[in-house]
Amino acid sequence: MTTLLSNTMTAIAQYEIPKPGGSVQLRPLTAQEDAKVYLIQQVGVKEYKQWNRVISAESEWKQEAINRKTGDYCLAQINEESWDAVAQRLDLDYKNDYKDCLELAIIIQEEIGWSAWNSSKHRWGR
């Protein structure tokens, strides 16, 4: 498992840009790629696959995503009314910090399961 995770992290963290003459230049990760690497570190490769489906359906990996109608915020579209008190108690700035958003999402998933994101379930397979 450690080797698989390490190889996956390396593959994600190093995006090669071909240059003339066969040389390669590495570019920095985008914010979305950085969030994906962080999530893999937190949950592992196997669990990441389900998280990727959910977050892709919920926010397309955009930390700034806000659903003003429902009060859902961040990558994981966490409901403010349901989870803001928990976030405050844990000192998680989930609306502005992708790591805090993902940490709170993991807590939510561990407490109530994937049902927290049932509204997007029909898009998880896409």
Image: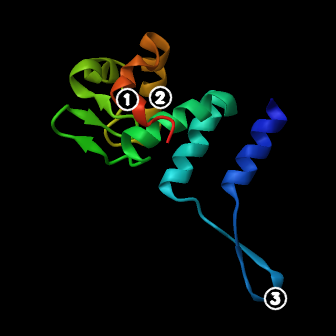
According to the picture, the residue beneath numbered tag 3 turns out to be 21
User: Coloring scheme of the render?
Assistant: rainbow
Residue 17 versus residue 94: which sits nearer the camera? 17
Find numbered disc 2 in the image and state the secondary structure of the residue it sits on.
helix
Q: Which of the two labelled residues, at mark 2 and mark 1, occupies the earlier sequence position?
A: 1
Q: Nearer the viewer, mark 2 or mark 1?
A: 2
Q: Is residue 96 left or right of residue 124?
A: left
Question: Which corner quadrant of the image does residue 20 belong to?
Answer: bottom right
Q: Which of the two labelled residues, at mark 1 and mark 3, occupies the earlier sequence position?
A: 3
Q: Is residue 32 left or right of residue 75?
A: right
Q: CA distance from mark 2 to mark 1?
A: 8 Å
Q: Nearer the viewer, mark 2 or mark 3?
A: 3
According to the picture, the residue beneath numbered tag 1 turns out to be 92
Q: Position of residue 59 (x, y in %)?
A: 37, 43
Q: Which mark is residue 103?
A: 2
Residue found 33% across the figure and 43% down from its top: 96
Mark 2 near mark 1, Cβ–Cβ under 8 Å? yes
Q: Is residue 27 left or right of residue 51?
A: right
Q: Position of residue 16 (x, y in %)?
A: 71, 68
Q: Which mark is residue 75?
A: none
Find numbered disc 3 in the image and state the secondary structure of the residue it sits on.
helix
Q: Residues within 10 Å of mark 2 (few under 14, many from 20)?
A: some
Above/below status of 85 relative to 32: above
Q: CA distance from mark 2 to mark 3?
A: 43 Å
Residue 42 versus residue 58: which sits nearer the camera? 58
Q: Amino acid at mark 1?
A: Leu
